[in-house]
Amino acid sequence: MNVFPPMQHERLFVPFLDEVDGTLCLPANATAADVHAQARAHRLRFPLLLDEAKTLREQIAATTHAPASCRFGPYCDNILGMNWRLPSGRIARIGERVVKTTTGYDWLRFLLHSGSRYGEPVDYVLRLRPDCGFTAIGRFDGDTKALRSCVSKLLHSGWMHWWDAVDYVTEGRASFVRVMIHCVPEQAPIFAQQLEHVAASTGTQLKLQNNVPPPLDGLPDLVIKTTPDRAIGLSLELAHAARRCVALCYSGVVHVYMNESDDLTERTQALVQPYTAELHTLGGDWHSRWLPATPPTITESAWLNTLEEAIHEH
Amino acid sequence: MTSPVKDSLEHQLKALLPRGRVLTSAAQLAGYGADGLGYKNHLPDAVVIPADAEELAGFMQGARALGVPVVMRGAGTSLSGGPVAAQGGVIVHTSALKKIREINTEGFWCEVECGVGLNDLDAALKPHGVFYPPDPSSGPVCTLGGNVASNAGGAHCFRYGVTSNYVLGVEAIMLDGSVHRFGGPAGGRGPWREDWKRFMIGSEGTLAAFTRFWLRLLPLPEKVWTFRATYPDMKTTEAAIHALVAHSSYPAAIEMLDPRGVAMVESSQMACGLPEGSFMLLVEIDGPEALVNARVESVAEILRHAGSQDVMFSDEDALRQKLWKARKASGGLLGQLSPSYVVQDAVIPKRALAEVLQLVYDEADAANIRAVNVFHAGDGNLHPNFLFDSRVPGELEKVEFISKRLMQRVIDVGGTLSGEHGIGNDKSAYMPLVFGPDSMRLQLAVPATFNPAHQMNPLKVFDNRHFIA
C-alpha cells in the first residue's frame, strides 16, 4: 500500500541558480552568452559549450560531447534535469536538480539526444563548475607520429583528469594537438611546465596562449562516437572529405565540419557508410543533422511502440 | 518441508540447469532471504547458479514458461531491499559469471562479466595504471552486476561521478532468452536507433538479466592527500563543505560523520581521538604530484578558516588510512550496535544540509530511535542510519514514520529519494512524492516495454509492480 497518494501535478523546475550546488536552470533556448552571464557572477562556468550564438538546445541536439568532455564527461553527465514538452503539449519533469540520483528509470539520458522524436526540452538544469579565473590553450605541432605520441603522453598519466580538452585537429592536410587548461592563475606555471615536458619528450613544438577564451568550434555536421584509441585514425581518414575534423581524444568522438554545398546529405551519408559495420561492432554510433535517424530493427520497433504509447498518451 | 508445487518447480529447474546449480533446501535458501538491510526477509522458492551466459539465457527462456518471479542477485549487499524475492520465485545468483574478459588501456575500457567483484576489478586494473572510479563501501564484496543495477556511487563520487558515468555498454538477456548488446567499448548506441542502455543502468533487475559490461577507465592519480577536520557545530561544518565544493582543487571526496557517529566510533575499539560532540569532515584531493602538492595548503586553510582547530592531513598511506579510520569503521559498527537498521539515501541541495539533519535528529529523538549520520557531504547525499530492533513491536513502524517525514521534507527542499542505493522495496512507497502524473506514466512505461508482466524482480522500484502468472 502506498504511503503517499498519487501526485496530481508535475513538480516542474522553475528557473534558478544555486551557487552552492553549482546548478543553473534556464530555458533550452538560452545561448552560451546567457549561461555565461548568469554563471560568471558567481564564479561558475558551464564548460561544455561549442558555439557562442547557438541555443543550448541546438548544441545538445548536434552532439553528445564537447571538447571539455575530456574532463567533465558528456552532456548527459552535466545536465541534471529538464522540463520536457510531450507531443501532447503537456510538460513533464525529467531528472533532478541535485548532482546524483538513482530514483526511477533514467529518462533524462534516454531523451537528451533523441532529437524531437518524443517532444522537446523546455528548460535544462545544468551542472556548473568552479570558474578558476585562468584559461590557456596549448598547441602542439609536429608530424603525425609525434602528435599521436603527444596525445598518448597527455592522456596516459594522472594529468589526464586535469586537461579541460585534448583534441586532435585536422584541417586539410595539416594537423595539430590542442590542449585546454583551466586553473587558478598561480598554478598555471605547473600546467605549462607539464606541457613543455610533453613537447620535449615527443619532439613536438608547443605554443601556449594564456588568458584566451575556450575554443568554440561551432556545431559539427557529423559526429562519430568510437573508442578513444580509434578516434585520431578515424579523424585522419575522414579529413580528406571535410573542411575540418576535431577528434576529442579521450571521449573517442570525432566532430566533422563539412564544406558547404547543396548535397550535404549525400556527402555525409557517403562519408559514414564505410564505417557503419565497424561502429556497430564497437558499440559506437554516428549522428548528423543532415541524416535521418537510424531506422529501428523489428525488436526495437516493438519496444518503441510501447514507449511511444506512453509518451503520446493524453 | 516440501510441497507438490515446490517439488515440481525443483524438478523443472533441474531440467534447465545441471545438478548442483539448483538450490532448494531450507538451509541453502536461508542465505538468500535478505540483502544488506537485513530486517526484511523474503525466502525464495529456489536459487539457480548458471555457469555462463548461455546457461542463463536458457534459464530465462524456461523461467518465462514456468511463470515464476525471477530475481537477479550478485553479492546481495544492496541496502534497498533490491535482490530479494519479495514475491517468492527464483533467485539467479551470478557468482559464476566472474571473468574479466579484456582490459584495453589504449582505449580506456574493460569488458567484465556481471559477477566480477568490484575490488577484484580494481586489483586487476592497478598494474595497468588505470582504475574504475565508482567505489561503494561494499567494494570488497559487491559485484559489478549489482553496481550497475543500482547505479552505485561511493565516497569519491563528488569528483568522479557514479556508475552511470562509466558504463559504456551492457549485455542483457530478456525473458524470452534473447541476448542484446546495448552499446559496447565505444559507449554509443551500437546498431540501435535509441540508447537503450540508459534504461538498463539503475533498473534494479526489473528489466532484464545482465551478463557483461563495458566500462570506462581513467588513469590512476599519482598522488593523494587526505584531510581530517572536526567542527563544533553543523553551521561551521556546512560552511566548510560549501567552500570545498567551490574550490579549484576539486576534492575527490568530502565525507561527514556527525557527533552521534563520532560518539559511536569513540566508544568502540576503533576510537581515534575525535573530540566529543564534534562533526568530522574527511576530504581527499588527488592528481599529479606537482599539482596536488600545490593545493594542499589551500585546502587545509579552507578547513581552518571555517572553524576547525584540529586539521590533520597526510599523503602517507599509513597515516591516510588512520585518518579514514573513523569513517570506515562507522559502517561496520552500525551493524554491531543494533539488531536492525535502516539507512536512507536521499540527496538534497547542500544549502539544506543543516536543516534536514536537524529534522532527522528531532524526529528520531521524539520517537526514541537512535540516528547516526555518516554520508557523502560533497554530493548532498545523506545516509541517516536509524538503529532499531525489528523484534520489538512498533519499532519498525516508528522508523517508517520518521522516514516518511524525512522523505517529504527531502522532496520539499528540492531533493530526491536515492542517490546511489536504488529504490528496491525499501523506498518504493515514496515514489508518488517524486513523479507527477505524466512523469509517472513515463516511468511505468519502461518496465511495460521490457518486462510487461513484471516477472523480473516484482514489487521493486514501484510497489504496484505485481507479477501475475
Image: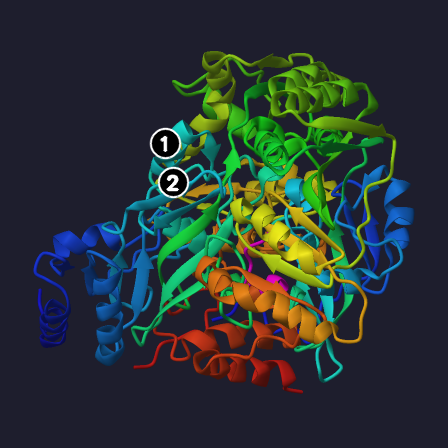
- Residue positioned 64% across, 53% down in the render: A254
- Residue positioned 87% across, 53% down in the render: A52
Residue, disc 1: B123
Residue B128's place in the image compared with A37, above or below, is: above
**Considering the image in quadrants, where does the C terminus of chain A appear?**
bottom right
Can you give x and y, in whole percent of width and height, for residue B426 in the image?
A: 45, 57
Q: Are marks 1 and 2 on the same chain?
A: yes
**Mark 1 belongs to which amino acid?**
Ala
Is-magenta flag for residue A113?
no
- Give the magenta part as a residue range: A101-109
Q: Which disc number belongs to residue B466? A: none
Res B281 seen here? no
Q: Specify the principal SS of the magenta part.
A: loop
| Left or right: B397, with B226 as reference point | left
Residue, disc 2: B118
Q: A111 or B423, which lies in front? A: A111
For the rendered model, the colour scheme is: rainbow
Q: Chain of mark 1?
A: B
